[in-house]
Amino acid sequence: MVTLLSADLSRVVLHRWAVDGRETGTAVYLDPFGDGGERTWPYVRWTSEEREIGFPATELVPSWTADAPPGAWLEVEIQARTSGGALTKWYVMGRWAETGADVHRTSLPGQGDDDGDVAVDTFVAARPVVAYRLRATLYGEGGRVRSMSVMASAVAAHPGPPAASAASRVPIELDVPRRSQKLHDGHFPQWDGGGASWCSPASLTMVLDYWGRGPAPADLAWVPADDPCPAVDHAARDMYDHSYQGTGNWPFGVAYAGRYGLEGFVTRLRSLAEVERFIAAGVPVITSQSFREHELPGSGYSTGGHIMVVTGFTRDGDVIANDPAAPADAGVRRVYPRAAFEHVWLRATGSGGIAHVVHPPDIPLPTSEGNW
């Protein structure tokens, strides 16, 4: 058994940063989703040195874990250096808080210029960039940035011919709890229309449950008692991006998991062979893909973008996934043909191999080739 590997995914790197804010000051912020009043906030700011990427990159995606309880919030920005040597402006990559008590969690549209734009959670360069700086500003009191990372990648406009990578042929399956997003249809439609769109909250909840983490019962008291899994509703509420009007903002998902003591990052993986290495280490991988029904046999649906959890592999190398699009928890476990799954996940016209990894700090990851 061999699987397809998009040739354009070899150029990806994940940089991790230790954040130690030194610059202090105050700033006025008007929450566009608030009550219309400005508020002055004290802040602590950290700005990284310039980091060389090592190749001409077309996309940058930051992710973070932080403590930002009521009274605190975090703004993350990126500035890039183009291949011509010029510096871009600072682009806001997200304004994040654990709850909406003080500031509404949001991405920031409308930043596009000649150098690039921000597509929800991704800086998309108008022309390749070769270096960048990262800035994290923590507003208010009681907050703390625990980890910060940036994934830089070169995503080709036209995918190259596929290469082949061998499956391990070692069957393995992690015991990840199964959660259907469809059981939440109609729940709290103010957050991305309700459960029909909650693939990301359902997937994060499955992985949090696997690690024995998540909100305490008292934190779920606002959810109706007959809800099949209140933690999914909680995740949808606290991952919701008010500008994007969705629950699928990738860094916000990692940050949500970080509230419960997990480390995490968004990256691109180059093949299912890399996913196999995580599974062998006991770490499930959350993937993002889009496809028509016929492209992923056994799915039973088409999607312009969907999140699921890879939990294992069969002896033939096919993918065992917890797919939250199932109508009930009992149908969440799916086995998808390896080649088909890898194609719809890796192709540049889709997510290009996007993956979320969240894990306890004491669980070691497999040896990295630079992209985690």
Image (cartoon, rainbow, N blue to C red):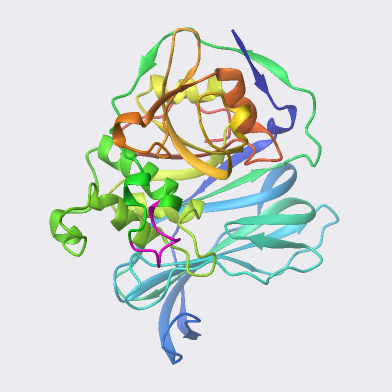
Query: Magenta residues, as a range?
Result: 188-195
Residue at 33%, 23% in the rendered image: 174
Task: Point out residue 91 in the picture as x, y percentages from the top left corner.
Answer: 64, 67
Q: Nearer the viewer, residue 89 or 311?
A: 311
Task: Point out residue 250 in the picture as x, y percentages from the top left corner.
Answer: 50, 51
Q: Nearer the viewer, residue 99 or 333?
A: 333
In this picture, is 321 found above or below 164? Answer: below
- Per the picture, the main secondary structure of the magenta-coloured stretch is loop
Q: Is residue 218 left or right of residue 349?
A: left
Residue at 69%, 30% in the rendered image: 10
Residue at 53%, 24% in the rendered image: 274
Q: Is residue 198 visible?
A: yes
Q: Residue furthest bottom?
A: 37
Q: Nearer the viewer, residue 205 or 10?
A: 205
Question: What number of labels is visible?
Answer: 0
In this picture, is 152 found above or below 85? Answer: above
Q: Quadrant of the N terminus?
A: top right
Q: Is residue 178 visible?
A: no
Task: Point out residue 306 in the picture as x, y percentages from the top left corner.
Answer: 52, 43
Task: Point out residue 294 in the picture as x, y percentages from the top left corner.
Answer: 62, 28
User: Which of the 4 image quarters holds residue 209?
Assistant: top left
In this picture, is 327 found above or below 215? Answer: above
Q: Nearer the viewer, residue 339 or 18?
A: 339
In this picture, is 42 found above or below 98? Answer: below
User: Which of the 4 image quarters holds residue 296?
Assistant: top right
Residue at 41%, 44% in the rendered image: 264
Q: Is residue 11 left or right of residue 308?
A: right
Q: Is residue 78 left or right of residue 117?
A: left
**Residue 266 in magenta stretch:** no
